[in-house]
Image (spheres, rainbow, N blue to C red):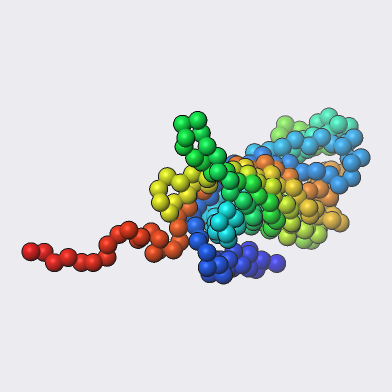
Amino acid sequence: MKALPVLLSSLFLLLIPSCKAQVYIGPMVGGQLSWTQFDNKDLYDTYGVKPVWGYHAGANVSLKVRNRFFLHASLLYSTKGRKVEGKEDKLLTNKAKYTFIEVPIIYAVDWRGRLGNGKEFKFYFGVGPNVSYWLGGKGKLYNSDLDESADFASRDLEYSIVFNEDPADATTNEMNVAEPNRVQLGLNLASGLVLEPLANQRILLMLRYELGHSFLSRTSSGTFTPTYYVDVLQSRNKGIRISVSYLLDLRVENRKRGKSTIKRKKV
């Protein structure tokens, strides 16, 4: 499983030479608001879930498949999470931030619009899969059990997320997930604007909604040493993401088009 991020990177890079069409590549950054959805709806009687802010950064590739059809594929480092609040235990607050390597893929169709002054712009709609690899994360926890402890009565339990750890080796500042689902799948719904400030350059603005399909864990919950509380991980990631990427035409001949390569002798 440790080799999966490398495999995803290789798969991402293989997309470039596999397509003879026009290819744009460049950096992508953005912010996001994410949360999770419990599989068991009855859990909402016990817990409330609120979204948390995060970010993503990496590289984006846009392949022009046909006239108006583009395939947008990104390789991103992403932070997601959620804030769980107790309805029965009024002191319960668990704010977690997860880190992922993500490969969102969008198959999009471009459309042209026209402003009042006659200028044109492009916008697009798209859909596609989202593949994520769960790296880990961290969080802050407080509940009534910790409130009664002399060690935590005046402060949160700050923890890191670890996977498959032997319970005998667990420490008070860790949340252990015995059987994590580290490879997760989801669905992207996207729309945005395309700006072309100069020839062979694109600025891509993207609004993306991620609908998670896979659970964080199918069979286990996050466990803590100093408290009875367990973090329910039979839940799916969801989120709204806003991104911007600056792209250059990868085909060198396009960037040189119109420029003379003939060397003139000085008189």
Residue 258 point in image, percent of width and height = 32, 58
Outermost residue on the right side: it is 42
Q: Give the position of the C terminus as an image quadrant.
A: bottom left
Query: Seen in the image, is 1 located left or right of residue 230?
Result: left
The image quarter containing residue 164 is bottom right
x, y percentage for residue 67? 55, 56
- Which residue is drawn at the image coordinates 55% and 39% (left, top)? 113
Can residue 181 be seen at all in this image of the molecule?
yes
Q: Position of residue 162 (x, y in %)?
A: 72, 55
Quadrant in the picture for residue 147: top right
Is any atom of residue 79 visible in this view?
Answer: no
Residue drawn at (46%, 37%), measured in percent from left and top? 119
In the picture, measured across the screen, residue 182 lies left or right of residue 86, that is left
Instruction: Judge left or right: residue 239 versus residue 256.
Output: right
Where does residue 129 sit, x and y in percent of width and height? 70, 56
Quadrant of the drawing holding the N terminus: bottom right
For residue 227, side relative to residue 140 (left or right): right
Name the residue located 76 percent from the left edge and 33 percent from the top edge.
153
Q: How many marks?
A: 0
Name the one closer to the observer, 140 or 58.
58
Splitting the image into 4 quarters, where does residue 156 fall?
Answer: top right
The residue sitting at the front extreme is 118
Where 176 sits versus 44, above or below? below
Residue visible at 63% across and 64% down in the picture:
8
Relative to 153, say whether 197 is above or below. Answer: below
In the rendered image of this protein, does residue 193 appear above or below residue 148? below
Q: Nearer the viewer, residue 153 or 206?
A: 206
